Image (cartoon, rainbow, N blue to C red):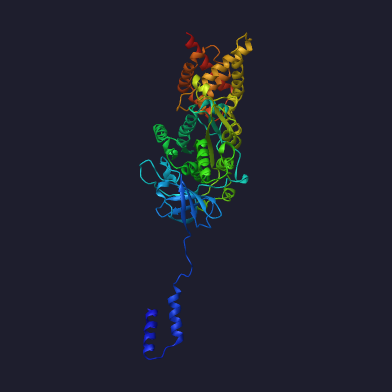
Amino acid sequence: MLHKINKDNLIENMANNTIKVSEVSELLRMQLEGIDTDVKFDETGTVISVSDGVVRIFGLRNAESNELLEFDNGMQAIVMNLEEDNVGAILLGSSNEIKEGFIVKRTGRVANIFVGEGMLGRVITPTGEPIDGKGPIKGDLVEMPLERRAPGVIFREPVDTPLQTGLKSIDAMIPIGRGQRELIIGDRQTGKTSIAIDAILNQRESFDAGDPVYCVYVAIGQKGSSVATIVKTLEDHGAMDYTIIVSASGSDPAAMRYIAPFAGAAIGEYFRDTGRHALVVYDDLSKQAVAYREVSLILRRPSGREAYPGDIFYLHSRLLERAANIISQEEVAVQMNDLPQSLAKRVKGGGSLTALPIIETQDGDVSSYIPTNVISITDGQIFLEADLYNKGIRPAINVGISVSRVGGNAQIKAMKKVAGSLKIDQAQYQELAAFTKFGGDMDAVTAMTIDKGQKNEQLLVQPVHSPMSVEHQIAVLYCGTHGLLKNIPLSRVLEFEKEFLNTINLSHKEDVLKPLKEGVMNDEIGKIIETVASDIIKSMQE
């Protein structure tokens, strides 16, 4: 209104030839007041070449490493190479959709994924797009960077809580704790994925008990049909309620296979930093290494051993170091290094992220480049052997060279007490069994060791996708480690196990199973187990 009056006054004064300078300056000042004088511009570049999922761009002088770029058609790319006269970026989509001369602009954001509770039960791409046909992801989503520095030493706590896999041979001999990095390594078709899937299925018990471990399964370079089979298995066992699947199939660009594990780690970190527990399975990192090699060679980076780039070790170490058991003191946890701004108000202490990387070997060769790298980064390895698998001993774990450098601290006391010597016993048995193949006389002690080892080996055999609760495991293994099976033939060990568990379930829930679950193991419980076992053995001999 004032503006209008001043303008009218000015026109009137002009007519009367009595213009006042103060009125003109006041009017100009008022008109200029609302103008935004900040210069705004988007830094843009031009595509100069595109091939095999990699683009070279001219003109983005200020681009940063890992920055997200956007093309005219909406496709995105991640900056990988910063060269003197151009920028090398990897495409998050098909190369066919990008042509020379396309305009590219900087987003000013690092490569990220939007994470939230609505992702549970979904199958997504490494960029967070759902691919299961169930519509968009619902609920509140938080921006998480794909690449992030691992929590510092101050923000970590020692691993002290077991992550039960439900597999007798692992929980007893190679235990995994929450916050650990345990490598699963072996040749093709030795049951690596099955171990990881069983570990996910076994978290159903924790989920029902109100202490969930949220699982992220990252499928790298797998067939779509294989991923669909895994989804079906998880759905059938009710595990999709707490699981997210990140899929970058073999037909996806190399960039997608390269970033898929980072997307899985970012999702796991969302749960970890909000005070919950998460488990990430990387299946498998050999294929990520190949994808990274592909991208690096196209970007003309110098190659090293086995044609892998020099920073391939750093690739896996910066990924796996993100697994951690976070300090429970919240006032310390909120000061965590490299914390995304989006999480600043949500941080809680006491969360954990456990990593189960999978590596495929060729002819059992653990001394090649990628296996040795990942073995040195992780806190132990579960080594699977094709010979054992073919013999029907599944999970086909070679006890001699499998190890957990942390998990023993996280084992419940009852398991530690019962299965403490099992690993050494089985390793000893495997050595002796190798020698006895040559024939010759055996003394009584050797014969007894071999008999006990054979029966324990049978006890540790477990059908696929049938995880066992920890109290049942302890009760069964007690029979094996205390030599209660010496009077039954090897062929009837599995029959004994079935009968024994049925009897214990029916008659001794309160006086055996309940205290075992709480970690209590005493002579009284031992006597009950021995009585039940001897009664079953008698009935089997009749």
Q: In this view, does 131 lie to the left or right of 267?
A: left
- In front here: 119 or 97? 97
Q: Give the vertical position of 305 relative to 533 (above or below).
A: below
In this rendering, is residue 317 above or below 529? below
Q: Is residue 523 left or right of residue 241?
A: right
Asked whether 542 or 241 is in front, the reply is 241
**Which of 170/250 is in front?**
250
Q: Quadrant of residue 201?
A: top left
On screen, residue 460 above or below 178: above
Position of residue 250 relative to residue 441, above or below, is below
Quadrant showing the N terminus? bottom left
On the image, which quarter does residue 155 sit in? top right
> Residue 21's spot in the image, x, y percent?
46, 86
Q: Is residue 479 visible?
A: no
Residue 14 percent across, percent down from the top left: 38, 88
Q: Which residue is drawn at 47% across and 61% down?
A: 42
Query: Does the rendering let one see residue 168?
Result: yes
